[in-house]
Image: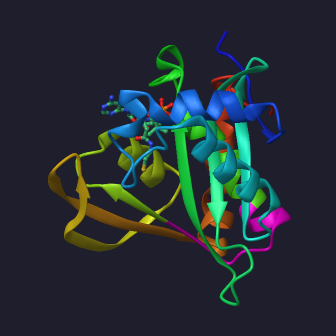
Amino acid sequence: MDAMIDLRDLVADDSERLFAWRRQGEVNRWMSDQPPQAWGEHQAAFLAFMADQDRRGWIINRDGQPVGFLSLTGLTNCNRRAEWGWYIADADARGRGVGRAAEALGLDKAFDELGLQKVSAEVFADNEAALKAQAAAGFRREGYLRRHALKDGQFRDVVLLAILAEEWGACRARVRKILASAQLIAA
Ligand SMILES: CC(C)(COP(=O)(O)OP(=O)(O)OC[C@H]1O[C@@H](n2cnc3c(N)ncnc32)[C@H](O)[C@@H]1OP(=O)(O)O)[C@@H](O)C(=O)NCCC(=O)NCCS
């Protein structure tokens, strides 16, 4: 049986975990910004995040163990549109459907709980896992941004993806059924 996935709200104790996770090579290589190098810098950013009405973050749990992080930014803008950010930090948890399950749970939060009408994401063009996972949930390509991000000395192309509330509504039952039959989420 596969492991069950859930999302839980961030708590103050998650700060150290996020500091370590975000700096891991396999996570950092797919992020367009640079991770904080010093603990103080990270902790200040973490506290600002926790206090910011514009952002929400969740820990992705696999069988109750923290394995990743999911965030939405832009919750207070008048467009009711937020930007998606995520990673699975535990290498053993990647490529097993954890991302797809967390995504379905995160989209429910975005559209049902937070009342957004659109979620967008910027993904490096060679990030196959993220592109596949996001396409599977119904994200559609809205643009291709050439040499859009400078990462580790290289200019990278970025794919702009987005999903509308009604598009998630149309895919939700099918996606959740697949995840429930794989025993990744409750039926
Ligand atoms: C992107 C990420 C969140 C996806 O989560 P995951 O649990 O690894 O992905 P899943 O197991 O749910 O698989 C999603 C899809 O990607 C595919 N996939 C998974 N790992 C892959 C890899 N290394 N290369 C190519 N495809 C891969 C799966 O086959 C699946 O495709 P399918 O639905 O067509 O079968 C995760 O791989 C990750 O955190 N990567 C590093 C950080 C990152 O890239 N974050 C996103 C930045 S935009």
Q: Left of 159 or right of it: where is 122?
A: right
Asked where in the image residue 149 lies, by quadrant, the reply is bottom left
Residue 173 in view, yes or no: no
Identified at 46% across, 52% down, the residue is: 134
Relative height, residue 112 to residue 24 (above, below): below
Asked whether residue 115 is drawn in magenta, I would say yes
Residue 122 picture location, percent across and down: 40, 62
Q: Left of 19 or right of it: where is 32?
A: left
- Is 117 or 14 nearer to us in this picture? 14
Residue 17 picture location, percent across and down: 66, 27
Asked where in the image residue 111 lies, by quadrant, the reply is bottom right
Identified at 49% across, 44% down, the residue is: 36
Residue furthest to the bottom in view is 78
Q: Left of 109 or right of it: where is 100?
A: left
- Is 5 or 73 nearer to us in this picture? 73
Identified at 68% across, 65% down, the residue is: 169
The span shown in magenta is 110-120
Colour setup of the view: rainbow
